[in-house]
Image (spheres, rainbow, N blue to C red):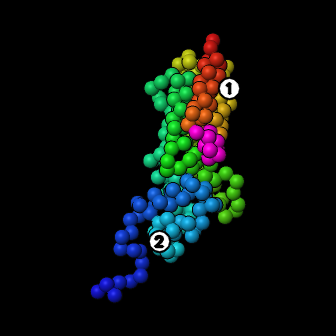
Amino acid sequence: MDKMRKAGRPRSFDPDEALHRALMVFWERGYEGASLALLQEATGLTAPQLYRAFESKERLFERAVRLYQEQYGFAMRSDLPLVEAVGDYLERAADEFTREPGRGCLVSTGLLATGKDAETAAVIVRAERDQALSNLRDRIVGAVEHGELSREIDVPGLARTIGALLQGMSVQARDGADKRELTRIADTARILLSAAAQP
């Protein structure tokens, strides 16, 4: 009977495990650095098996980004005043970006400069970054409405500044910065934001 088995996925194939292994490759290497050979080696699948399971490298990356957000993503706390929430958010980033299994943020640095072959994947992470920026703007608007910040504050500018800090921390983590070094960025941001919040 086994000899009659058609060629296909290995009997032990676990799509969730394969996806997680692919995520680790994308997280370490970025989209364009994650070659088909590396993805095959990580998942234990042949190229045809990989495409049958995940359709394309772009769809595999899209699912990996979704899994990354579910398992490793984090948001700003809504139960703290804005200054404390931003400090906590960046401190969490300092911790998350410097611990295993990956360094930095897949969404921030997994795909920046890109060629035409990666345009679909670029759209995927850009959409995630845009959503994060929108969430930051909403949080700041709420802080203004509750009197935590002046109504003169540049809401879009502040949101982009916090987003840029987060993305910069991801780059520095990829370059080897440790948790202590990144936490200093969070501490400095808290001080600057506290000063800006003073009436």
| Residue 80 visible within the image | yes
Q: Which residue is mark 2?
A: 45
| Residue 133 visible within the image | no
Q: Position of residue 107 (x, y in %)?
A: 58, 48
Q: Give the number of the mark in front: 1 or 2.
A: 2
Residue 56 lies, with reference to residue 169, above or below; the image says: below
Q: Identify the amino acid type marked 2.
A: Leu
What's the magenta bit mostly, secondary-structure-wise? helix
Which residues are the magenta region?
169-178
Q: Which residue is mark 1?
A: 154
The residue drawn where x is 65% and y is 29% is 158
Residue 101 lies, with reference to residue 90, above or below; the image says: below
Residue 127 lies, with reference to residue 20, above or below; the image says: above
Q: Identify the amino acid type marked 1.
A: Asp
Q: Is residue 180 magenta?
A: no
Q: Position of residue 194 (x, y in %)?
A: 60, 19
| Front residue (pair 112, 180) | 180
Q: Secondary structure at mark 2?
A: loop
Q: Position of residue 3 (x, y in %)?
A: 34, 87
Q: Secondary structure at mark 1?
A: loop
| Front residue (pair 98, 35) | 98
| Front residue (pair 137, 102) | 102
